[in-house]
Image (tube, rainbow, N blue to C red):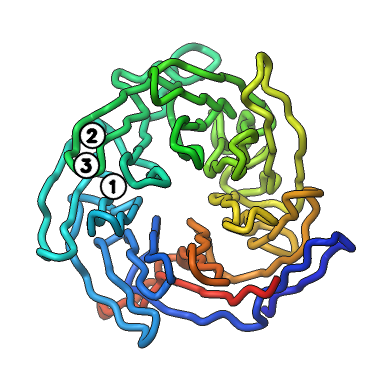
Amino acid sequence: MAPLNDDTADATKVTLSDQAFKIQLPTLVLGATCTKDGQTIYASCVDGVYRVNTDNKSHEKLYSHDSYASGAVYSEQHNLLITAGYDGNLIWYDLAKKEIIRKIPAHNFWSWKMAISSNHSMIASVSGQYLAGDFDYRPKPADEPTVKVYDTQTGQCLHAFDHLPSVQSVAFSHDGKHLAAGNLMGGIRVWDLETGELAADWTDEGFTSWGIIKSHCYIGGIYGLDFTRDNTDVLATGFGPMRDPMAGNGKQLWQRWRWNQDVPEKVAEKQQGSGLMESIQMHTSEEFFVMAGRLRDGDANISLFSTATNERIAHAKVGFRITEAIFPHENAKLIVVGGSGQPRNADGNFPNWGHIHIYELTF
């Protein structure tokens, strides 16, 4: 379906191209990164890690994890691709040598998300298994740190932080001084990366709920985080309250928090439609940000919001689950990745079910 634009009378004007440039991959894309110009995309997929050439839509498989590849970050400075997987490993791949140069068992459980600092000196990965810790089914504390920070070049672990599992999202501040992580219970923690101290800690129960139909457990959580460019606010998105997790009918939700004060203050919140929102990112212009994910009910699973007013200014609806949305640094583009449901085919030949859509932006 073609994107819709100019949702409000806000002064920030952004439009998405009517048709996306589409590329298909063999399996679901769980995480992705790209070069500054957006011409090359590195995709972490169910069956491995791919390099994608957007000029001719070609792709090549570079390597695999022992399970699903779930995250990817790219350092142009060091010509390194670093990926995470459901095997708990982080893999360093030298793009010049075309070989794996380092493999670190970072977690005892799945790595959910990854991030890289703006100067490419650090990477972060988050993990954690949700196990009931009491009769109220609140999560049991993890038996290992669930947030880890590594030196991009050497692979040295610089920080290992505790956060109640499962921790599903992570983001560096744009000045590289702080790291934020969000979990299943709607909890966000921010650490000072110079001192290793906890700088902020708050919880919003709007990002979690108790499943009373089919699944008696806590569900929802924060799946995407980013900082505003001045680093004063944290943007969070995920899954709002729901009754039936099998139906995926939680509210689409994002929140904006002024985190760097004695008591973090919620300065904005938007709910619309239903469905799990998995990604949120500020545009490099600082004028708007994107929220994207999977749609249950509503008119969009890609929405652009004005940074100045927090109002929606453009949106689109695509027929697949979006796992990550990316703004390349040097282009007026929006890249979204994900996939449709895994197809079934009796003869063993499965059609491609991983998707990359690229939209042109006008603003």
The quadrant in which residue 24 appears is bottom left
Q: CA distance from mark 3 to mark 1?
A: 6 Å
Q: Position of residue 285 (x, y in %)?
A: 62, 58
Asked if the residue at tag 1 contacts the one at tag 2, i.e. Cβ–Cβ closer than 8 Å, the answer is: yes
Compared with 88, 188 (above or below) is: above
Residue on which disc 1 sits:
84
Badge 3: how crowded within 10 Å, few (<14), some, or many (20+)? many
The quadrant in which residue 96 appears is bottom left
Asked if the residue at tag 1 contacts the one at tag 3, i.e. Cβ–Cβ closer than 8 Å, the answer is: yes
Q: Is residue 43 left or right of residue 323?
A: left
Q: Is residue 142 left or right of residue 301?
A: left
First in sequence: mark 2 vs mark 1: 1
- Which disc, if any, is residue 89? 3
Q: Position of residue 149 (x, y in %)?
A: 32, 32
- Which disc, if any, is residue 246? none
Badge 2: how crowded within 10 Å, few (<14), some, or many (20+)? many
- Residue at (78, 49) in percent of width and height: 308
Residue on which disc 2 sits:
106
Q: Is residue 18 left or right of residue 312?
A: left
The front one of 161 and 192 is 192
Q: Dot 1: what SS?
A: strand
Q: What amino acid is at disc 2?
A: Ala
Compared with 110, 354 (above or below) is: below
Q: What amino acid is at disc 1?
A: Ala
- Residue at (47, 40) in percent of width and height: 171
First in sequence: mark 2 vs mark 3: 3
